[in-house]
Amino acid sequence: MVPEMVPEMVPGKPIRKYANLASGARPCRDRTERKWKVGSTTYTNRLARGADERPTLTPEAFIDAGAEILGVSIGDIRSRGKGTVVVRAREKLALLGVERYGLRVKDLARAMKKSPDGISKAIARAADARRENPERTVELNELDHAIAARR
């Protein structure tokens, strides 16, 4: 075993586990561009993916801009409606807000008048749909560019 992968054992304290290192992940020290590698795949966080091109938006401003671009009213986003168009809009905005704009789930939930748990589930559904259907990635990229262009 590599020495940094061995858990540090201190009497009276819990064992510190290095699961990310044991899986092959190697974090970078630079905070603006965090990259890590697992096997042959290199991952980069949201700070390194064009964050300088995106405007800094409050959750409310982000939701307003996104809803307008998607053709859905703010009232629909905040409503209890379960129509396909409204649910997809919520999912896209939640995923994009967290992944690319660095907004917190709690703040997005407050802006959408939803529970944080519900927004987390919407993000998970949007991520699953994106994984299964490459067209969703294109839709998210287009929405991202449209919101960023609104500065």
Image (tube, grey):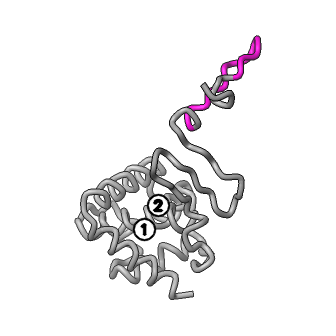
Rendered location of residue 61, percent (x, y)? 55, 76
- Can you tell which of label 1 and label 2 is closer to the viewer? 1
**Looking at the image, which residue is at 33% across and 82% down?**
71
User: Quadrant of the image for the C terminus?
Assistant: bottom right
Rendered location of residue 104, percent (x, y)? 57, 58
Q: Earlier in the sequence, mark 1 or mark 2?
A: 1
Give left or right: position of 48 versus 90: right
Instruction: Establish if 40 lies above or below 77.
Output: above
Rendered location of residue 54, percent (x, y)? 57, 78
User: Quadrant of the image for the N terminus?
Assistant: top right
Which of the two residues, 21 or 131, is positioned nearer the viewer here?
Answer: 21
Amino acid under disc 2: Lys
What residue span does the magenta drawing correspond to?
8-20
Disc 1 to disc 2, C-alpha distance: 13 Å
**Looking at the image, which residue is at 53% across and 49% down?**
37
Give left or right: position of 28 versus 147: right
Which of the two residues, 82 or 125, is positioned nearer the viewer here?
Answer: 125
Which of the two residues, 63 or 20, is positioned nearer the viewer here?
Answer: 20
Q: Residues within 10 Å of mark 1 (few under 14, many from 20)?
A: many
Main secondary structure type of the part rendered in magenta? loop
Instruction: Pick out the residue farthest to the top.
Output: 11
Q: Circle 2 sits on which residue?
A: 113
Residue 75 inside the magenta-drawn segment: no
Which SS class for mark 1?
A: helix
Amino acid under disc 1: Leu
Q: Circle 1 sits on which residue?
A: 93
